[in-house]
Amino acid sequence: VGYTAYPDNVVHKFCDQAVRSGMDVFRVFDSLNYVDNLKLGMDAVGSAGGIVEAAISYTGDVSDPNAKKYNLDYYLNLTEELVKGGTHVLAIKDMAGLLKPKAANMLVGAIRKEFPDLPIHVHTHDTSGNGVAAMLEAIHAGADAVDASVDSMSGMTSQPSMGALCAALESEGIPTGVDNAGITALSEYWEAVRPQYAPFECTVTMRSGSADVYEHQIPGGQYTNLHFQAFSMGQADQWPAIKKAYKNANLMLGDIVKVTPSSKVVGDLALFMVQNGLETEDDVLAQADVLSFPSSVIEFFQGYLGQPVGGFPEPLRSKVLKTGTASAIVPVQGRPGADLDPYDFAKEKKKLQYVHGRSITDKDVLSAALYPKVFKEYMEFKDEYGVVQHIPSYAYFSSLKVGEELNVEVRDGKQFLIKLVAMTEADEAGNKQVFFDVNGIPLSILVADKSKADLSEVREKADKGNPGSVGAPMPGQILSVKVNEGTSVAKDTPLLSLSAMKMETVVTAPVTGQVTRILVKSGDQVQGGDLLVEIDENASDATSKGEAKPGELQPGYGSSMDEPPTRGVKK
């Protein structure tokens, strides 16, 4: 459920709570098809009394006679492992829509022949436009269930059209048990709802699917996010280069299975390469000693996602982990969650109650365990704004216009008629006075006009000819600064962390020396190449010899001023 490894008791607690909350079928998958991780999830679901639907995450092309890594034998062997592990249903999770019609027939047919009584459930995306054809072939080969989407929400990086699929099956005399009129009614409902969420539509930047997914292999859910990231980071004109970089990054990482979070690793590396003008693996290897790789890439090579098929590629892994140097990052052996200490739910509940009050539930504690940063932001929002789920979507996302009225029903018989009367221009502090009526009672409130924020600040740029002039590797927001002016640092010491559209990078010292200037603080927005920190290589004789002085920061991630960029809260 998250982008990181969890203690085993968190996994079991989640499954137990989900079953008690009404969940019955659990699709258990691993981003690398790492069997040890899969077995833990399967055991947790089984122990909680749920139905285990273990998934093989599909990549490659089994219809390619030259396929060696991800061929039919690979998927049959993986299926056998999952059957031995006790799965009730087998899912084929084709997250990028790579399952061509012929491949769907071959894969499902081979599994059905080997495991005649095993229920098979196929999931795909329609990025290439081949989704309906592929699902028809899967059904012909013996699939018991396939995923589809109502017509108005289907196509492109979503699932293939349910209406089209059902019509095709009925024309072949294969009953679906689905009422066509019901499909139409659902489709019309969502067609009306969809415009209210227009700002979040992939169609803001996308207009169609594309069969080049067979080349770059970007998963459907990530394709839209990555496309939006590229536009947000000023790289819209480089979208073709990003797709090419994604393909290259995947091969550099060992041609891995790509599904959350392994797909994020590939995407982060691809954006990083484009932002820094790195086109090939040789380019990356040549500059690896001075590059601040995205945290997700470092964690992948540390083994925090598990072990990829065929192992980690060298020499890139050694370069990223700085193997053999004083700042070497220690990799994890085996299943990453096995060595994590059990999560103390009772202790965490007391902490949350202290911060947010006694209303904290066991579900809240579990949410904090799974998504600590997201849960913190949610509770802060809730503490500030209260209950907002009764506000209609259009008003929540787009706000009211002057003179517009809104009727909000918070419970049976309890309603608020809200009218926006007027608002002032922003004052020098960037605040507006907003006047409104609530059930006829005039009220006003002072709010910050975020649209008036000064975005014109031009920052000093890093000097590319000076190794101690540390620039931002990409546009983003400063999450934290880990050093102070005057601090002596060794090469590879973490200086600060930077986040760009959920991609976090720990910027490290490219040289040994003393920090003379820090030009940013937490929360600042920066552009690629902006000067962040200056380090004087000649200011510390001790650090130049690699000797620690009192209070000096050493390379690595164990300093009291830093947290390991390896799991949990920093994501």
Image: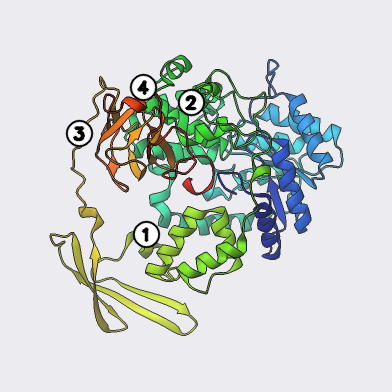
> Which residue is tagged 2?
326
> Which residue is tagged 3?
460
Location of residue 97 in the rendering, given as x and y in whole percent from the top left corner: 59, 34
Tag 4 secondary structure: loop
Q: Nearer the viewer, residue 520 or 257?
A: 520
Question: Between marks 4 and 1, how big is the CA–CA gap?
Answer: 37 Å
Amino acid type assigned to the residue bearing label 2 in the image: Ala
Residue at 67% across / 65% down in the picture?
21
Amino acid type assigned to the residue bearing label 4 in the image: Gly
Question: Mark 1 or mark 2: which is in front?
Answer: 2
Residue at 27% across / 38% down in the picture?
486
Q: Is residue 270 left or right of residue 450?
A: right
Q: Residues within 10 Å of mark 2 (few under 14, many from 20)?
A: some
Amino acid type assigned to the residue bearing label 3 in the image: Glu
Residue at 39% across / 40% down in the picture?
497
**Which of the 4 image quarters holds residue 113?**
top right
Q: Is residue 510 left or right of residue 457?
A: right
Question: Between marks 1 and 2, how big is the CA–CA gap?
Answer: 50 Å
Q: Which mark sits nearer the N-terminus, 3 or 2?
A: 2
Question: Mark 3 or mark 1: which is in front?
Answer: 3
Q: Which mark sits nearer the N-terminus, 1 or 2?
A: 2
- Are the residues tagged 4 and 3 within 8 Å (C-beta)? no
